[in-house]
Amino acid sequence: MNNNIIEIKNLHFRYGADSENPSEEVLKGIDLDVKQGEFVAILGHNGSGKSTLAKHLNAILLPTSGKVFVDGIDTSDDNRLFELRQCAGMVFQNPDNQIVSSIVEEDVAFALENLGVSYDKMRKRVDDALKAVNMYEYRLHSPSQLSGGQKQRVAIAGIIAMRPKCIILDESTAMLDPQGRKEVFSAVRRMNSEYGITIVFITHYMDEAAQCERVVVMNNGKIILDNTPERVFSQVELLKKIGLDVPQVTELSWKLRKAGVDIPSEIISEKECVKEILKLFKKSY
């Protein structure tokens, strides 16, 4: 049984493909499947194609060639665009660009009003969505009074209220301070673990990617790595070669191995690193 919510088949894309002067290919034959309920991080330096790929998942962009299916819907099918965007919600980088109302709960309800959802159902969905991102107590506040992280959580609540099967976050923590990033990432993890919502998380923060279930690395419009965080971040030299960092503890273990210390390559958390270093001390006494 196929339980993929996203299926990308030989996706090619170039901007202005129909013009006399199209750009070079941005996506060069992407093949990618994402299972329902997965939490997938997509990494890549600026210009790698990761945001362009994200915009194909709810038909902001359409393939130059190849196919993208989300929950069985062909993203190039204009007749199912409305259905597609109910299934795959998108959260962008700047929360200020997504806030449309002067009261938090009205902002979360905005899309539901446009969908013609009844008041009783809308009330429950809005309350549930705000509670899910720990913003219920701010429901009557003005978004202008909120921090960047709180605004982004309101934006996520607006997507959750639509009951999507998948949420795509396109560098949604990039403009936030460390506390705001932590708040948003915690809310997203909860959506995945408690509600089974598939998460596609575009980021350039390695510590966020290390907490995901799966990491996909893009370079020059192609996927070059696709595995668990442990396996992906163990490829330190390759990642550095394409301009990406690795979690600090992974880099520490890599440097220790280069110095001749017998320590595993697939360390991505401080707890693991401390455990392995303590083992070395015990062996030496």
Image (cartoon, rainbow, N blue to C red):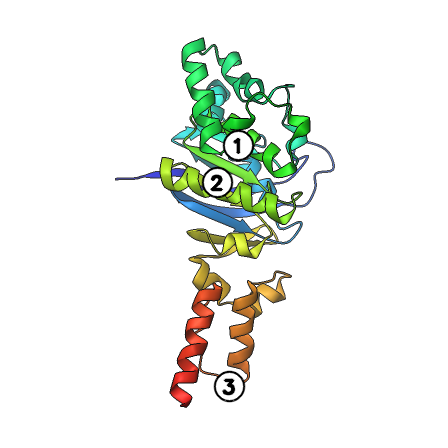
Spatial separation of the CA atoms under disc 1 and disc 2: 8 Å
- The disc, 2 or 3, on the residue closer to the chain's N-terminal end is 2
User: Is residue 19 at least partly visible in the picture?
Assistant: yes
- The disc, 1 or 2, on the residue closer to the chain's N-terminal end is 1
* In this picture, residue 250 sits left or right of residue 264: right
User: Is residue 93 at least partly visible in the picture?
Assistant: no
Q: Quadrant of residue 45?
A: bottom right
Element marked by disc 1: helix
Asked if marks 2 and 3 touch (Cβ < 8 Å), the reply is no
Which amino acid type is marked by label 2? Val
Kindly report which numbered mark, 2 or 3, lies closer to the viewer in this rendering: 2
Residue at (48, 40) in percent of width and height? 188
Picture disc at residue 156: 1
Picture disc at residue 188: 2
Asked if marks 1 and 2 touch (Cβ < 8 Å), the reply is yes
Nearest the viewer among 43 and 256 is 256
Picture disc at residue 260: 3
User: Where does residue 107 sit, x and y in percent of width and height?
Assistant: 58, 21
* In this picture, residue 180 sits left or right of residue 130: right
Which amino acid type is marked by label 3? Gly
- 209 over 160 or under it: above or below: below
Nearest the viewer among 204 and 139 is 139
* In this picture, residue 65 sits left or right of residue 32: right
Residue at (53, 79) in percent of width and height? 256
Residue at (52, 49) in percent of width and height? 42
Kindly report which numbered mark, 1 or 3, lies closer to the viewer in this rendering: 1
- Label 2 CA crowd tier, 10 Å (few <14, some 14–19, many 20+): many
User: Where does residue 138 sit, x and y in percent of width and height?
Assistant: 56, 27
Element marked by disc 2: helix
Spatial separation of the CA atoms under disc 1 and disc 3: 46 Å
Of all residues, the one furthest to the right in this rendering is 21
* In this picture, residue 21 sits left or right of residue 196: right
